[in-house]
Amino acid sequence: MKVEKLFSPLKVFEECVVVIDVLRAFTTAAYVFAQGASRIIAVKEIDEAFTLKKSYPNALLMGELHALLIPGFDLGNSPHLVQDRDLTGRTLIQRTGRGTRGVAEAIGSKIIIVASFVVAEATVRRIRSLHPQKVSFLITEGDEDLALADYLEAKLTQPSVDPQPYLERVRVSPTADHLRQLGETFSADVEAAIQLDRFNFAMQIAKEDGWPVIYPMA
């Protein structure tokens, strides 16, 4: 299996793309699914989220602008704050500054998986089950995302991998430092993001009515 790393922004048209956003889009997505959500529709722009809400009036809007809750949205981009919400059966519409934009860039690819450290092992299993000839890791932010790409590549090619150096890169990344400066909730988000393999599912995109929809995959 060939592995490559790609850096956003660019248009990606590949066999299998793993879109990575550790802090915080796809960490939050995983926590949302753990709280019972049925699916997440990923959008690139804020106005797209509000427009789509008209078609799905019972959906919840989730996301951020410059790390902060978007006015009119129901949930922010915070794994810490969603982990106690009952989201059973709910559809969420997610817009973030980097992660969901990465999904939009990769939408022409055959297989799209979204990933974070909390679903790393399940993501590796999912990739292997699909038997792609090549896997492309799309880095949407900083070294915290490249750390996950490096870790997943190592897991795909080596029998045993020490995760601690990769998790430490998340802890000391500029993005993590920036979040900590915003307050306690954001610091808790960083800690939530480095709970390695907390959840036993991967997250894969299906295309429905022209929209990328994220589902948990056991």
Image (spheres, rainbow, N blue to C red):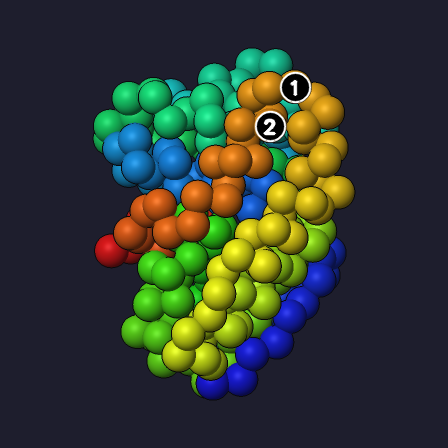
Secondary structure under the numbered disc 2 in the rendered image: helix
Viewer-nearest residue: 102 or 3: 3
| Residue on which the image places disc 2 | 187
Q: Residue drawn 54% across and 31% down? A: 189
Q: CA distance from mark 1 to mark 2?
A: 6 Å
Viewer-nearest residue: 123 or 111: 123
- Which image quarter: residue 85? top left
Image coordinates for residue 82, horizontal then vertical, percent: 41, 25
Q: Residue drawn 46% across and 22% down? A: 81
Is residue 92 shown above or below 85? below
- Which image quarter: residue 67? top right
Viewed as shown, does residue 187 lie left or right of 83? right
Number of residue marks: 2
Viewer-nearest residue: 116 or 16: 116
Q: Are marks 1 and 2 in contact (CB under 8 Å)?
A: yes
Viewed as shown, does residue 161 lie left or right of 149? left
Secondary structure under the numbered disc 1 in the rendered image: loop
Is residue 195 shown above or below 179? below
Q: Residue drawn 51% across and 81% down? A: 134
Q: Residue drawn 33% across and 68% down? A: 125
Image coordinates for residue 43, horizontal then vertical, percent: 55, 40
| Residue on which the image places disc 1 | 183
Task: Using a 10 Å C-alpha cutoff, classify the residue at mark 1 as few (fewer than 14 neighbours), some (14 to 19) or many (20 or more).
Answer: few
Q: Residue furthest top?
A: 72
